[in-house]
Amino acid sequence: MLELADVHTYYGNIRALRGVSLSVAPGEIVTLIGSNGAGKTTTLRTILGTVRPRRGSVTFNGHRLDTLATDRIVRLGVAQSPEGRRIFPRMTVLENLELGAFARPDRAAIAPDLERVFALFPRLAERTAQQGGTLSGGEQQMLAIGRALMARPTLLLLDEPSMGLAPILVETIFQIVQDINRQGTTILLVEQNARMALRVAHRGYVIQTGRIVLQAAAVELLRSDLVRKTYLGEK
Amino acid sequence: MRRALRWPALVAVLLVYPFVDRGLGLQTVHAVSDGMIYVLLALGLNIVVGYAGLLDLGYAAFFAIGAYAMGLLNSPLLGSPLYGHPWSFWLCIWLAAAMSALLGLAIGAPTLRVRGDYLAIITLGFGEIIPVAIRNLGDITLEIGGWRPIERLNLTGGENGVNPIGRPYLPGVPFETDPVPWYFLILVIGAASLWAMNRLRDSRLGRAWMAIREDETAADCTGVNPISTKLLAFALGASFSGFAGSVYAAKLQAITPGAFEFQVSIMLLCMVVLGGAGSLKGVILGGMLITIFDRVVLSQTTFFVRWIGRAVGVPALVSADLTLWRWFFFGLGLVLVMLLRPEGLAGRRVRPIVVGGDDLGDSHVEPAPAPRVDALPGWLRDRAARGGASATASILEVQGVTRRFGGVVALNEVDLVVPRGAIIGLIGPNGAGKTTFFNIVTGLIRPDAGRLVFEGASLAGLRPNAIVRRGIARTFQSIRLFPEMSVLENVLVGEHCRLGATVAGAVLRPPGVVAEELRARDRARELLAFIGLDGKAHDLARNLPYGDQRRLEIARALATEPRLLLLDEPTAGMNPRETETLTVLIGSLRRELDLTILLIEHDMEVVMGISDQITVLDYGVRIAEGSPAEIQRHPRVIEAYLGTGYEPEPHA
């Protein structure tokens, strides 16, 4: 479904990705784990076209994404919950969510999806008329995820969805990830909470300084020495 | 050209230029001198717009004040009894600068709380007011009952302006007949101003301006007083235009209100933006380019176009006058520059520049090495030891703090006593009011009710920067660094409130100030070494990876020499290994520096591992308080926050 082949992405002269190749099959949850600055967020940005690779290709269901404008990519069925939330601070919670569905042709199905998001995050339902910028950090995180879900994507890119959330919600988030995956959404998940990510994912990639250094089924990665020492914090 | 030769070469060119001009009969000295006056104006505006980030659309008002100060004080003919005796140019130039600075304060004061569009509109208003006032103050009659204390007083010359204006007098220097002395006079004033600005920029004041520009709230919470900082920018920026205005008036020998209209403000702004806001070199370039283009290129090209028109026989070209199109060309030039080089001709590139090949760039992507707890700066240790004599057992006492936002009660009668040297965890569901609590302690928002006592003194009514000075520092949940400043500068802004250099000190650099600045830089470097960022001191903060940014924020907070440190989700977005190092670091801050720490954190291993006490908030109400072990078993905490899936660590 999604295929990155030898992707090199630069910020100015800085090489952020140095030949990343990865693939995501329909129906999968794939997680990308790595340290800060390893290139996880850059990988997601490259997929969504907010930065362009200097070399290599990104293909999604037969479409080349690396030359396509971001809004076209979203219309193809890719949505993301970005790092740092990036909600629309002066628009209400409801407007933020409605904008998530901006590119959808099936207007009629939007209302039930809105209900679904409110069921997932009751906190957002309490605050529909509040400006996004006045929400607490964790609530903004919920809003960013909800907004991505409103696009009803076939491929969902999640960048650190558990960041800033209370433990009770972290569980919920990973449950949601599994639920929407069962309902047919393919997910590429970037997480610092590697343990949780690997528990819900089917497969995982480990990225270090812009290169994929390891890929395997999630259960195997949970057992790998490298992952356990570096990313799970085990001694 | 070699770097070492560049300055002497430039000076030589500037010194020889007017004589070459005379030799060749170019007659451009006048235009170049006027250009330098505009450059000086643009440099003053650059302090306001480029450094402090305050968009000023009415800057020509200061120019007008400078010019009229000179005009009124130094004109032999003006009808006012006050001004019958012209004062010396050399005195008036200083008075003009002082007048402009005063007006800068007057304009700055009401605009302090507005930014961006609002500030632009207000300054636009001031820019309109001044020429109109000057026009109408040419004929003043004050009537009280039948008594007229002032009758038909001509204060400003009205629409006709002031004419003539006295010229500077120096024995043997022909200011009356020759443009060359003017050139050198303006060159000297310009060079002195540039020298002063350069020093100001590299001082604690310059850093404060830039910090305000980057993020006013973060600057306030780092100990920079935004009000005095902005006022200083307005006043200093205005004083430079006072110099420029007074020289302009004396050089022209006549001024009219028409010379200070809105277009002049816009043209000055164009110079700053075209060259690159915040870059001295850029502003000089922008100012010279625009003036030379306006005064020389357009008129010369007009001759050329007419000549072509005659040669080819096109009547439209023969009668063309390109000077009428000057605003068209300004506009076009600006549009092109903004499209091709939005940072200006000589501004700092927005994209990072890495000198050398690809492999040099790698270090920027990789996160910095772990913090080195062993490298804890000695000076911080000394500070901690010196301040340890305080008697009260609790460092912070919060009583009954309540805060409402519209209908939502964000905090409801929250009490918290923070013992000296403790690490207090603050946890609770998202939206429980934890960050609001931090905002109240740091003075960012005022509580509707309740008392806050820090080190035995109330914090009521204090602005964030005053609270930082008292010894409370914080980090932000969504990192708020000064992104376009270097890593080192970010930490130096943290030291701002512990440094004392004034404007005079920053410009003249007496030994005390030099020593203070060197010490500040040493301390900042030590802090960076401690936090593990010493290899990146000169990177822009925005180019750091996420985890490094979090650590830089902690270093900046430590630079303010706090007694109480508020950390808002310091490990968010960090992997377990980074989290562990940071946890060790937080522990060592408490152990080594006797620092008291309030910690908002969702990583339970961290909170439970290092907190002495934990307070739990839910919907703005404190629902539990106790040791980590008690909190882990607390049914309401499990229900509202931890969830049933949370398993307490066996060792906790």
Image (cartoon, coloured by chain):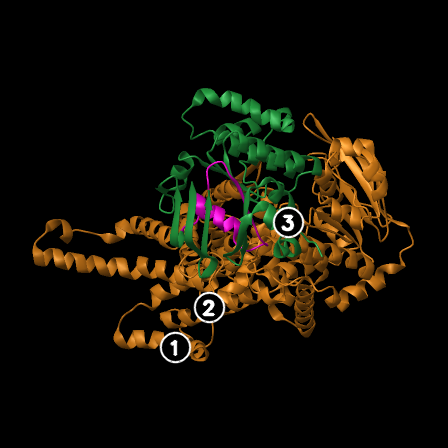
Chain colours: A green, B orange
Q: Disc 3 on helix, strand or loop?
A: helix
Label 1 to label 2: alpha-carbon separation:
19 Å
Amino acid type at mark 1: Met
Q: Which residue is mark 1?
A: B1
Tell me if mark 1 has few (under 14), some (14-19) or many (20+) residues whose alpha carbon lies within 10 angstroms of its own. few
Q: Nearer the viewer, mark 2 or mark 3?
A: 2
Q: Which residue is mark 3?
A: B218
Q: Say which quarter of the image contains residue B527.
A: bottom right
Amino acid type at mark 3: Ala
Mark 1 vs 3, N-terminal side: 1
Q: Say which quarter of the image contains residue A126.
A: top right
Mark 1 vs 2, N-terminal side: 1
Mark 2 vs 3, N-terminal side: 3
Q: Nearer the viewer, residue B576 or B329?
A: B576
- Give me the disc on residue B183: none
Q: Nearer the viewer, residue A217 or B647?
A: A217
